[in-house]
Amino acid sequence: MSSAFRSFKVYNYRLWFAGATVSNIGTWMQRIAQDWIVLTMLTHQDAAAVGVTSALQFGPQLLLTPITGLVADRFDRRKVLIATQSAMGALALGLGLLTITGVVQLWMVYLFALLLGCASAFDAPVRQTFVSSLVPQSLLPNAVGLNATSFNTARLIGPALAGFLVAAVGSGWVFLLNAATFGATLGALFLFRTTELVVQHPPARARGQIREGLKYVTRRSDLVLLFVMIFVMGTIGVNFPIYSSTMARVAFHQGASEFGLLNSAFAVGSIIGALLAARRERARLRTVAIAGAGFGFSMIAAACMPTFWSFALVLPLVGLTAITMMNNANAYVQTTTDPAVRGRVMALYLAVFLGGTPIGAPLVGAIVNAFGPRWGVATGSLGGLIPAAIAIVWWLLHRRGRAQPPAGEQLPATDDARRELATTEIAVVETEVSKT
């Protein structure tokens, strides 16, 4: 089996990958339909309203972090996922029914976005760390990469399909179809061979467990750097619904099908980037920084494209660099973090990444409204350029040193392979960068 797909040797992971891919396609379909009705049906091409919708959907990720991270570490992740996936499916069903009956209003979309954000806040860290229950530690970087491949394959198919369906039957039916796709993930969760799941050892009940995850991160300068980079990217760079919808509708005067096509063009590059990430044996901070710079320059190029098709041709490069940056950051955190606090650390990571959206999305929307879509895309380039600059400064300050595990902290002696990966990765990354 190709090294890029070696996690498929595990039955439970194959099942999870298939179910997640179907569900992700539905999720991307709903995102496109939701942004489109806000932009074209419930407002008069108001990019700020699209930004508010994104802010409401991702804001709970930040506010609920102390609780969601602890849930990911303490509770049975499979059972938590059954609950969150069921709730998200029910919300899609409700929004679909409101839309096809013609009673949907902007405040209703805002409300459903907020409720979906609350469910996603619990779902995301559990889903991110659940992969460590499906595959052995040696396959974890590959499984993380394949998860990104699933997500971006859905990004390729979902938007194009949504654009066609919105034009053909309307957004309401797209929401209902998304509700049905959650059955794929739920089916996988019920069909797992539970005896083959990697045993999860939740921490004993004690005070200060929520703070423990934060302390772990603050004692790791490499993680602090990564969290700062990802916060900037999540706040400024990852506002693709605003960029693609306004460029399609306002800059190029196109319809829903073309809007979906732009998202699919972005996904082509994302899939390539995810597959390349799956082939890597380990994630590197250097790759995160280089990809960030590449994202910034490709966004500038996209903002300058004069026609719809030239803009679409640049988007695969935007997708490639964006997913390379985000996927390597995700894999680095998961593979170098102590399993005992991994859920809390991943919740913090997702909060930092998605928590900036309530700030950045309305800001980018306001820039688009005031100066036009091209200036919004150009602003998004800072999401990659600023992190790359921060990384350069950090490496200059640390070029003579090598990162060590936090003082007094021992990685679990029962997992020699993971301990070696965690300690060696940090040192190798900084050593290699210092040679450049």
Image (cartoon, helix red, strand yellow):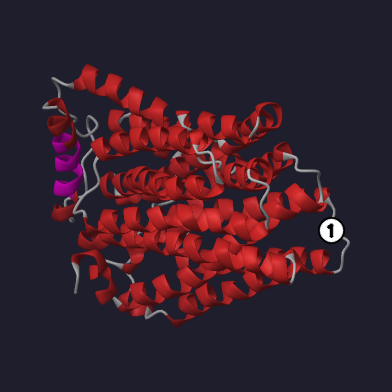
Graded by Cα atoms within 10 Å as few (under 14), some (14 to 19) or many (20 or more), the crowding at tag 1 reads some
Q: Quadrant of residue 432?
A: top left
Say above or below: 296 vs 283.
Answer: above
In the orientation shown, which residue stands out farthest toward the front?
A: 306
The three-letter amino acid code for the residue at tag 1 is: Val
Residue occupying the point 38% across, 58% down: 271
Disc 1 target residue:
104
Q: Secondary structure at mark 1?
A: loop
Q: Quadrant of residue 144?
A: bottom left
State which region is magenta: 419-428
Identify the residue at horizontal 29%, vertical 67% (top origin). 135
In the current view of this chain or complex, which residue is farthest to the right?
103
Residue 250: x %, y % from top left: 68, 42
In the displayed structure, 120 sits above or below 243; it is below
Q: Is residue 31 magenta?
A: no
- Image quadrant containing the N terminus: bottom left
Find residue 47 and report its horizontal and vertical position in percent: 70, 39
In the image, taking residue 152 as reference, residue 196 lies left or right, namely left
Quarter of the picture containing the C terminus is top left
Observer-nearest of 246 and 427? 246
Residue at 35% across, 75% down: 14
Label the magenta part by its dominant secondary structure.
Answer: helix
Task: Work out whether residue 221 or residue 249 is closer to the camera in this orientation and state it.
Answer: 249
Viewer-closest of 329 and 222 = 329
